[in-house]
């Protein structure tokens, strides 16, 4: 029986998010990731008529797109500390900026070589912006551009983009683990050691700790509503500025004040809302229409893949000419393509404890600038 109660469907969506998180922590689910798993679960439940699908959507879905997605982005950028990013050191910051430029070049070149407009139509330029955003600092930027241009409401296209992004991000994690060893043999380099006294093992450990202070929810939940209302109000006076950019900017500004820095639950809450948003994306994927993904899937794979290849080629050549540390180059590239979390994991797996905190910090930088890069690329193309 098809369930149409907003309250009941919301309860099911929350259960699916919980299930996706559990599966992502298992041996089989870990390589896939919670984001893709939650989309798949949403699609399965919708196609078995356990929750509404795109054909018989309910008001809850549009409310999640309109309110939940932007607020989740605000919570995630609330952890961006621009002052602390300086402790990453000039080499890491320079490599990260180089990687962002390499991504933009890759997207533009891939756009003209692949010609996605012939398949994606009006969504080709927004998709270019989504790719530029996500490969400059993570999925926060991907979703920000997607929400503004309503790519998320296309269901199949957005889910296909998520799937391709997950596959290529996983491949790039493996590649950045292997590249330093291979390239050091072909073009020997040497490690760059940080002289910054602020980066210590204790700080590295503190950066990995997650403080679950549930009292913070008393502040975070109303704060999200207030900022969203402020964003809508600003939009009345400056309609030319996308609301997603406004709410991102407010979040970054607030993140520079010490009181907001203490709200460590913001990232958890933001991730949860992102998964709630993604499960609805899954519900918009109807199996009857999946056959239409053929050309779209191939186009997306070429578009995303060529962008990453060009990004990697520029990082390996110019990055090595400017800096000799192959591991640092790989970690900075991973911060671009996969975000701060995977970059941190890469630094830890390489035994570069002094680069763990810088990896997190430049990942935050990507979250701060990636949305702007995404919108700029989409507008340019």
Image (spheres, grey):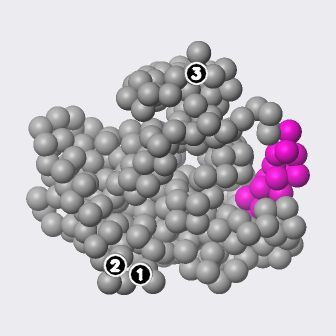
Q: Position of residue 145 (x, y in %)?
A: 54, 65
Determine crowd level at label 2: few under 14, some 14-19, many 20+ residues with C-alpha closer than 10 A: few
Q: Position of residue 357 (x, y in %)?
A: 34, 54
Q: Position of residue 176 (x, y in %)?
A: 63, 51
Q: Quick check: 307 left or right of 66?
A: right
Secondary structure of the residue carrying tag 1 is: loop
Residue named by callout 2: 236
Which of pointers 1 and 3 lies earlier in the amino acid sequence?
3
Q: Is residue 1 above or below residue 324?
A: above
Q: Nearer the viewer, residue 63 or 262?
A: 63
Which numbered disc, 1 or 3, marks the residue closer to the eye? 3
Q: Quadrant of residue 364?
A: bottom left
Determine crowd level at label 1: few under 14, some 14-19, many 20+ residues with C-alpha closer than 10 A: few
Is the residue under label 2 in contact with that under label 1 (CB below 8 Å)? yes
Determine crowd level at label 3: few under 14, some 14-19, many 20+ residues with C-alpha closer than 10 A: few
Which numbered disc, 3 or 2, marks the residue closer to the eye? 3
Q: Residue at x 56, y 71 (%)?
A: 374
Q: Position of residue 152 (x, y in %)?
A: 59, 53
Is the residue under label 2 in contact with that under label 3 (CB below 8 Å)? no
Residue named by callout 1: 239
* Residue 51 shown in magenta: no
Q: Which residues are magenta?
A: 291-307
Secondary structure of the residue carrying tag 3 is: loop
Q: Nearer the viewer, residue 242 or 162?
A: 242
Q: Residue at x 12, y 38 (%)?
A: 215
């Amino acid at each position: 029986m098809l369930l149409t109660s907003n309250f009941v469907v919301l309860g099911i969506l929350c259960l699916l998010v919980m299930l996706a998180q559990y599966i992502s922590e298992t041996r089989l689910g870990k390589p896939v990731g919670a984001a893709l798993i939650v989309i798949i679960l949403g699609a399965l439940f919708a196609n078995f008529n356990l929750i509404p699908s795109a054909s018989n959507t309910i008001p809850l879905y549009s409310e999640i797109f309109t309110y939940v997605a932007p607020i989740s982005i605000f919570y995630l950028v609330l952890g961006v500390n621009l002052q602390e990013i300086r402790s990453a050191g000039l080499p890491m910051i320079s490599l990260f900026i180089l990687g962002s430029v390499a991504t933009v070049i890759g997207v533009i070149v891939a756009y003209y070589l692949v010609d996605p407009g012939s398949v994606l139509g009006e969504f080709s330029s927004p998709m270019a912006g989504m790719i530029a955003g996500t490969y400059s600092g993570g999925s926060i930027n991907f979703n920000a551009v997607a929400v503004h241009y309503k790519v998320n409401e296309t269901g199949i296209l957005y889910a296909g983009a998520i799937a391709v992004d997950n596959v290529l991000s996983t491949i790039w994690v493996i590649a950045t683990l292997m590249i330093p060893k291979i390239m050091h043999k072909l073009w020997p380099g040497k490690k760059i050691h940080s002289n910054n006294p602020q980066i210590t093992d204790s700080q590295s450990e503190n950066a990995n700790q997650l403080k679950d202070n549930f009292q913070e929810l008393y502040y975070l939940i109303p704060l999200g509503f207030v900022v969203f209302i402020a964003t809508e109000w600003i939009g009345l006076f400056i309609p030319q500025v996308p609301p997603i950019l406004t709410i991102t900017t407010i979040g970054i500004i607030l993140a520079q004040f010490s009181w907001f820095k203490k709200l460590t639950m913001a990232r958890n809450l933001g991730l949860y809302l992102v998964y709630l948003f993604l499960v609805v994306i899954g519900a918009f994927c109807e199996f009857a229409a999946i056959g239409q993904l053929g050309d779209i899937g191939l186009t997306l794979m070429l578009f995303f893949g060529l962008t990453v290849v060009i990004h990697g080629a520029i990082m390996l050549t110019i990055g090595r000419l400017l800096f000799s540390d192959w591991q640092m180059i790989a970690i900075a590239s991973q911060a671009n393509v996969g975000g701060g979390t995977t970059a941190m994991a890469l630094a830890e797996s390489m035994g570069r404890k002094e680069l763990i905190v810088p990896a997190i910090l430049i990942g935050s930088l990507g979250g701060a600038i990636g949305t702007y890069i995404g919108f700029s690329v989409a507008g340019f193309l």
